[in-house]
Image (cartoon, coloured by chain):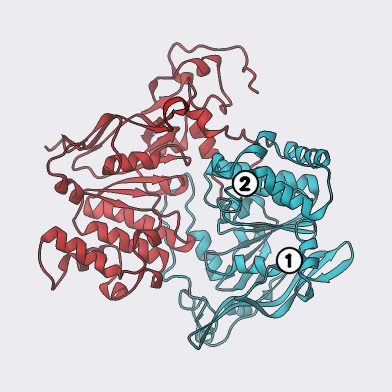
Amino acid sequence: MKNGKLLEVNNLTKVFTKGQGFVKSTIEAVSRVSFALELNQPEIFTLAGESGSGKSTVAKLILGFEEPTAGGILYRGRAVANLKGRKEFMKDVQPIFQNPFETFNPLKKVQSYFFETERNFTGSGHGSYPLTDKSLELVGLSFAEIKDKYPSEMSGGQLQRASIARALITSPSLLIADEPVSMIDASLRMSVVNLFKTLKEEEQVSIIYITHDLATAYYISDRIAIMLRGQFVELGSVKKVLDNPLHPYTQLLESSVPAPDPKARWTEDIALSDLETREYTRKGCKFAGRCPKVHEICYEQEPEYHSVDERLVKCHLYAQDQVRCSSRPQIS
Amino acid sequence: MAILEVKDLKAYYITHRYGRTTSVKAVDGVSFKVEKDEIYGIAGESGCGKSTLLKAISGLVKPPLQILEGGVTYNFDGERLNILALNDEKQRRKLRGARLSLVPQGSMSVLNPVRRVRKSFEDVLYAHFDLSEQEFEDVVRKHLDALGLDWTVMHTYPHQLSGGMRQRITIALSTILKPDIIFADEPTTALDVVVQRGVVQLIKKIKEEQQNTLVLVTHDLSIHANLCDRLAVMYAGKIVEEGEVDRIFSTPKHPYTIMLLNSLPKLGDSSPRSSAPGAPPSLVNPPSGCRFHPRCPHVMERCRTESPDLIEMGNGHRVACFLEEGSK
C-alpha cells in the first residue's frame, strides 16, 4: 500500500434532473472529472471555479452526500459508493463547511460537538476527553476558550478553527474544506489558511480546498484544478497554472483577481457571462461563448485534454493538429 | 465642493429588554467629507459599523437604530440639506432614488422573489413620476441598454437569474433616476472574481455616464484599490485612517491598516503572511481608550485610557493613533 492512492476519482459524473415528462431538463453538474491523491504524500489540492461550476458538488459526491450518476470514487483502493466499512471512511475523511455559524447549532454549546465526536470515535464514556484537548491545541485554541460557550459568543475565525479542530479528533487523513475562509473576517482569514498549511506539513493531512479565491489558493496549495461548468479545464501544479495560465478561462480568472494595489487597476473590459444554463448545455467547449480566442471548432466539438508544460489543458488551442480559423467568428 | 458632510455622527442600536438597556455603539463619532464626483471608499471588517453608517447617512433610521448626535449635510447644487433634520418621511422619500440612492447589501434578497423584475422597476419609477406605459418602457430600455443588460430580464423572476445578474439589476434599479450620490453596500461580496470584475466595470461605467458621486463600502481592500479615489478605514465604529487611496496603500500609518494590508495574499507571492492576534471587539462593550489597543503591537499605556483623535498628516491623510502624534 506504500505507493497506492489515498483517493482516486474516475470519470465522476453527476446529472441533476429538473421537472418531469415533457418539461424535464437535465444539467450535468459534474462531468467526467478525474483526479487522484497519493497515499503517504500529503498535499493541498484546490478546486477553483465560479459559483455554479460544480466544485461543491464534487465535495458532496466524495463525502457521500450525493450519489454519483456515473464514474467512481476509490478510497484507499476501495469503492466508496457501497463501502462496507462506511464508518472507517467517515472517520478518515472529514468535512469543513463554509459558514461556521451554520455548522454549529446556535442552541448547543460548542464543546458538546467535541464530546460527542470523541465518544463516538473512542467509544469511551463520560469523563475526560484527551483527544479534544489535543485537537484544540493543534488549531491554536485551548479548551478554556471554548468551555461553556455558545457559537454566538465566539468570533468567526475562532469558530472556524473550532470546526477544524472537531474534524481533527478522529485524526483523519483527508479533509474536505468547502470555501472555509470566505465567511471569515479579512484580518482573521490568514490564521485559518496558515492552519491548513501547518496541518499538511506537521500532521500529514491531505486537504481538498474548494474556493473561488485564487490568491489564497496560490498561497497554500500544491496542485490546482480549474473547474468550468462541471469540467476540469486545467489541472496542474499551482505555480505552473497560475503563474502562466494556458486555458483562456484560467487566464480570465487569473487576470480578474483584484490586486491590492492602486497602481494595478483593471483597464480592459471583459465579456460577461451568458445565462448559466446556456453554458451547461453547450455542445462544444463550455467557454466558447466568452472566450476571446474562440475558433469555429470550439462551438462544434468538445476539446480533449492535452498535456502541455506539465499540466492538463482542455482546449483546442493546444491540440497538435490545431484547426486554425482566419478570423474570429462573430458572436451575437 | 463637498457634496456630503458627516459631522460627529453617533448612531447606536438601543434595545430595552427585561428592564435592561443594551446599546450597540455601531457608529461612534464619525466625521468625513465626500467631494463631488469622487469615489469614496469605506473599508472595515464585518461588525465595524460600516453598514450602519450608510443607513444613517441615507436617512434610513428606524428603531432600534437611533442617532444620538451629529449631522449629515448634503449639498445638492448649492442647496444645503440636513437629512436627519427632516421629520417628514415624504420629504426623505423624494430624496431617495432621485438625489441619493442606496445599492443594498445582499442582492440575493433585495428583489422580491414572487414578482417579476419589471414590477420592481415600476415601483421605483412610478413612485417619482407619472409615466405612461410607453414612457416607462423607453426610460427603462434606454437605461438597460446603457448598462449592457438585456430587456428580457424584465420578464424574469429573480430566482431565474444568476447572482451576478441579480446584482447588476439591483445596481441598474438604484441608478435609473440618475442620483447625485450613490451608496453601494458590499456590491461585489459573495460574487466570483469574474462576475465581480463585471460589476466593478458596470459601476465605473455608470459613474462615467451619469457623473455622480459614489460611496463604496466593502471589506475587500483589493476592490477599493481598484476603484476608489479616497479611502477611510473603520474599526469598531470609528474611522482610524483616511486619505488618498495611493497614499494609504503605499504608506499606511495606523497599525490596523498595516495589519490588514499585510494579511492580504497576492497572486504570484507565497511568502508567509500572518493575521493579527485576537478578534474584532463587540460593539456593546468596546475596549476603553483606543479600540484597537488589545490587538495592537505598539500599544502604549496611554492607549488604554485615552481615545486618539484623527490628526492631519498632510495631503488629506488623517490617522487616529498616538504613535503618529509623537512623530509629527
Q: Is residue A198 left or right of residue B89?
A: left
Q: Is residue A114 above or below residue B190?
A: below
Q: Is residue A140 left or right of residue A294?
A: left
Q: Residues within 10 Å of mark 2 (few under 14, many from 20)?
A: few
**Residue at the disc numbered 1:** B315
Among the 4 quarters of the image, the one containing residue A2: top left
Q: Is residue B44 above or below residue B26?
A: above
Q: Chain of mark 2?
A: B
Which chain is red in the picture?
Answer: A
Residue type at numbered disc 2: Arg
Labelled disc at residue B115: 2
Across and down, in percent, residue A206 comes to: 26, 46
Across and down, in percent, residue B275 comes to: 43, 63
Residue type at numbered disc 1: Asn
Q: Do marks 1 and 2 both belong to one polypeptide chain?
A: yes
Secondary structure of residue under mark 1? loop
Question: Residue visible at 42% across and 35% down?
Answer: A226
Which chain is cyan in the picture?
Answer: B
Q: Foreground: A282 or A208?
A: A282
Is residue A155 visible in the rendered image? The answer is yes
Q: Residues within 10 Å of mark 1 (few under 14, many from 20)?
A: few
